[in-house]
Image (cartoon, grey):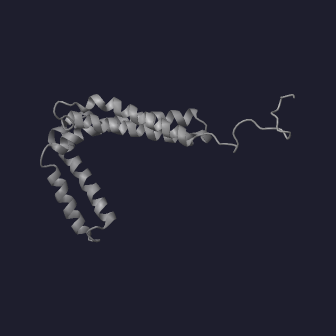
């Protein structure tokens, strides 16, 4: 019998690899890394391992985590793909000297994508709606407001340099250039 990758992924999904094993490993690895680097509980890696193991298993006890992971990571993949395409286009068409300014814009785009990904994931998972309010309706408004604020900050920060004087310059005699009299 010949298996292709799609069959293997379907089998993994049917035994819970994506819903339980991978979220468990991700939560465990992140917690272990945080505990090890911050050394809140000392430098005993055995304690870090036990605490990370317990928290990762408890996180998967209810359907909250698998549901959220099932919703957020596909959207994150799409968001990262959009950012990657923009990065490639900037790398191809923008001169190297001007890429510094584009980095701020790409950061703003990435921030907006992150907000959209999280808001839509919360909405689909059913965590964002309360009392009939659908958070997905406001994603566009939130993203637009952040974009406008980012543009205002970018314009304010990148303002032109001042020469130190305002208005037209006078000649030695106290008259404006071009005036006769």
The answer to whether residue 8 is above or below residue 43 is: above
Q: Is residue 44 left or right of residue 16?
A: right
- Camera sees residue 1: no
Front-most of 87 and 10? Answer: 87
- The answer to which of 37 and 110 lies nearer the viewer is 110
Total tally of numbered discs in the picture? 0
User: Would residue 66 appear left or right of 93 to someone viewing this image?
Assistant: left
Q: Quadrant of the C terminus?
A: top right
Residue sitting at the far front: 181
In this view, 33 is above or below 112: below
Image location (x, y in percent) of residue 125: 20, 36
Residue 44 percent across, percent down from the top left: 26, 71
x 34%, y 64%: residue: 37
Q: Residue 13's x, y, as percent? A: 19, 38
Give 1 or 76, whichever is nearer the viewer. Answer: 76
Q: Position of residue 180 (x, y in %)?
A: 87, 28
- Given residues 22 and 90, the one toward you in this image is 90
Residue located at (49% from left, 40% from top): 153
Q: Which quadrant does the N terminus fall into?
A: top left
């Amino acid at each position: 019998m010949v298996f292709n990758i799609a069959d293997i992924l379907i089998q993994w999904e049917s035994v819970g690899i994506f819903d339980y094993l991978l979220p468990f490993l991700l939560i465990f690895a992140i917690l272990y890394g945080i505990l090890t680097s911050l050394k809140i509980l000392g430098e005993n890696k055995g304690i870090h391992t036990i605490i990370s193991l317990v928290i990762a298993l408890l996180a998967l006890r209810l359907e909250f985590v698998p549901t959220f992971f099932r919703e957020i990571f596909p959207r994150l993949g799409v968001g990262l793909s959009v950012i990657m395409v923009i990065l490639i286009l900037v790398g191809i068409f923008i001169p190297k000297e001007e890429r510094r300014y584009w980095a701020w814009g790409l950061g703003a785009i990435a921030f907006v994508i992150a907000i959209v990904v999280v808001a839509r994931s919360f909405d689909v998972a059913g965590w964002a709606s309360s009392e009939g309010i659908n958070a997905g309706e406001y994603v566009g408004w939130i993203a637009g407001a952040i974009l406008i604020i980012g543009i205002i900050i970018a314009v304010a920060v990148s303002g032109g340099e001042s020469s130190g004087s305002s208005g037209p310059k006078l000649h030695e005699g106290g008259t404006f250039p071009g005036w006769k009299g």
